[in-house]
Image: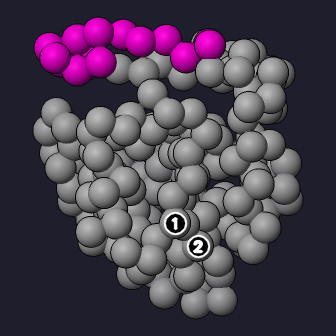
Amino acid sequence: MSQQLQRARELIRDVPDYPSPGILFRDLTPMIADAQALRAVVEALGEYAHEATHFAGLEARGFIFASAMAARFERGCILLRKPKKLPRERFTVSYDLEYGQDAIEIHKDALTSSDKVLVVDDVLATGGTLCAAIELLAMTKAETLGSVVVAEIGFLEGRKRIAAKFPRHKIHSIFPL
């Protein structure tokens, strides 16, 4: 790991009992606030972006990384939003979180069958959000190339959950947590 990436990792903060008791939240905002750390992370995520025509960012912190990657690598950015945030016709997928339930949506016309999409998020935990994103993107007929995440909480086994449901889906993470 490069010195810049190591420094970026050190900026991630643990916040116990947030958003509910028993959850250890990984706060990436100090890392995002540091321009050099953010650039190092975007460059590392970009190593898996060669074929992508678009980056699909998951609400909310995935937006930050997907947008930065889109600007850096001159590709499109698609936002996978929480319910009732998109004004036009949309696809919706519901999923379970480690601390509740949620859903994500995409405009039905956001992508075409000729698009190649890389899913971008901040943290892979239980895998529920990424499974929903993969399912949601399949509805658009675009090709999903895989997922990149800044950090992965291994003991929650999200990678195994995704592999069980989508065995060909590639996942790349920068920092194990």
Residue furthest front in the image? 1
Q: Which mark is residue 145?
A: 2
> Type of residue at label 2?
Leu
Query: What residue is drawn where x is 32% and y is 49%?
Result: 158
Question: In the figure, is residue 115 to the left or right of 90?
Answer: right
* Quadrant of the drawing holding the N terminus: top right
Query: What residue is drawn where x is 56% and y is 45%?
Result: 173
Measured as percent of width and height from the top left, residue 60 is found at: 47, 38
Query: What residue is drawn where x is 56% and y is 82%?
Result: 143
Is residue 85 placed above or below 138 in the rendered structure?
above
Q: Which mark is residue 94?
A: none
Is residue 107 placed above or below 154 in the rendered structure?
below
Measured as percent of width and height from the top left, residue 38 is found at: 74, 28
Question: In the figure, is residue 142 to the left or right of 18?
Answer: right
Q: Which mark is residue 170?
A: 1
Residue 15 lies in the magenta stretch: yes
Start-end of magenta stretch: 10-24
- Contact between labelled residues 1 and 2, with CB atoms less than 8 Å apart: yes
Is residue 9 placed above or below 54 in the rendered structure?
above
